[in-house]
């Protein structure tokens, strides 16, 4: 896999998993009581924390799997199945409602600063995004250039999320509830295809032994 192809795959995979446009209404709900300047600060900190978490997963994830005795092939299959489960929720319109419900509950527990919880964790750097990052890091196979491109893709997705947060009002008005649902379904189909490919890669690696 070439460098550009790897970067494009990493960026699209993470963008689909994080689904920034689906975060816009949740961000608005979480920061409704804040002034515009404070709202911007929350978005910046949430994006920064999500970047650090996913970058950490990219750098130490493969070593952690090795320490736990989990082969990369087995993790590809398990991670692919997890991503397929998330994709199914997106296709059937369940993810947006679930994320909104979880965010509302989290805000009741942490209403003062929603940047870390629930925006950064679990909405931006949740199990799906961390799993996708580990799978992409596994594809890099320790190549410093590819790992650097993966971190670049993580940064690009974090910046994309920050842009969505800053334009959240306009995005919510433009998409509406039905538009966000249709977009989530389309992205869910794409994520399902990516998830199946991860499973196939893992199965091939296992059969090669």
Image: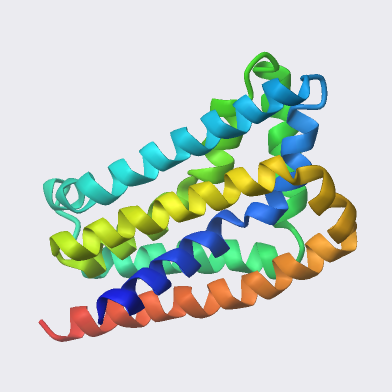
> How is the structure coloured here?
rainbow
The correct choice, above or below, for 75 with respect to 110 in the image is: below
Q: Residue at x 23, y 59 (%)?
A: 147
| Image spot of residue 201 (x, y percent) | 30, 80
| Image spot of residue 134 (x, y percent) | 31, 56
Asked whether 113 or 188 is in front, the reply is 113
Tally the marks.
0
Q: Residue at x 69, y 41 (%)?
A: 166
The correct choice, above or below, for 55 with respect to 104 in the image is: below
The correct choice, above or below, for 124 with respect to 190 in the image is: above
Would you identify the image quadrant in which residue 111 lies? top right
Q: Would residue 128 be visible to someone looking at this image?
A: no
The correct choice, above or below, for 188 with respect to 131 in the image is: below
**Quarter placement of the N terminus:** bottom left
User: In the figure, is residue 125 to the left or right of 94?
Assistant: left
Asked whether 191 or 70 is in front, the reply is 191
Asked whether 7 or 93 is in front, the reply is 7
User: In the figure, is residue 134 to the left or right of 182?
Assistant: left
| Image spot of residue 36 (x, y percent) | 76, 25
Residue farthest to the front?
37
User: In the figure, is residue 189 to the left or right of 93?
Assistant: left
**Quarter placement of the C terminus:** bottom left
Q: Would residue 29 be visible to someone looking at this image?
A: yes
Asked whether 121 or 47 is in front, the reply is 47
Q: Residue at x 41, y 73 (%)?
A: 9
Q: Residue at x 74, y 53 (%)?
A: 96
| Image spot of residue 167 (x, y percent) | 74, 46
């Amino acid at each position: 896999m070439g460098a550009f192809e790897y970067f494009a795959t990493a960026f699209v995979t993470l963008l689909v998993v994080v689904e920034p446009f689906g975060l816009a209404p949740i961000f608005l709900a979480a920061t409704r009581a804040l002034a515009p300047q404070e709202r911007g600060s929350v978005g910046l900190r949430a994006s920064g924390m999500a970047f650090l978490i996913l970058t950490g997963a990219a750098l130490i994830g493969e070593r952690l799997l090795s320490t736990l005795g989990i082969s990369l092939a087995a993790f590809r299959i398990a991670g692919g199945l997890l991503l397929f489960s998330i994709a199914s929720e997106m296709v059937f319109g369940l993810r947006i409602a679930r994320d909104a419900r979880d965010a509302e509950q989290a805000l009741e527990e942490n209403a003062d600063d929603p940047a870390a919880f629930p925006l950064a964790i679990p909405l931006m750097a949740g199990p799906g995004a961390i799993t996708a990052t580990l799978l992409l890091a596994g594809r890099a196979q320790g190549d410093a250039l590819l790992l650097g491109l993966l971190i670049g893709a993580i940064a690009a997705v974090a910046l994309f999320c920050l842009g969505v947060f800053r334009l959240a009002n306009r995005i919510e008005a433009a998409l509406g509830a039905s538009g966000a649902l249709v977009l989530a379904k389309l992205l869910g189909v794409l994520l399902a295809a990516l998830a199946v490919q991860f499973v196939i890669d893992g199965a091939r690696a296992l059969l090669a032994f």
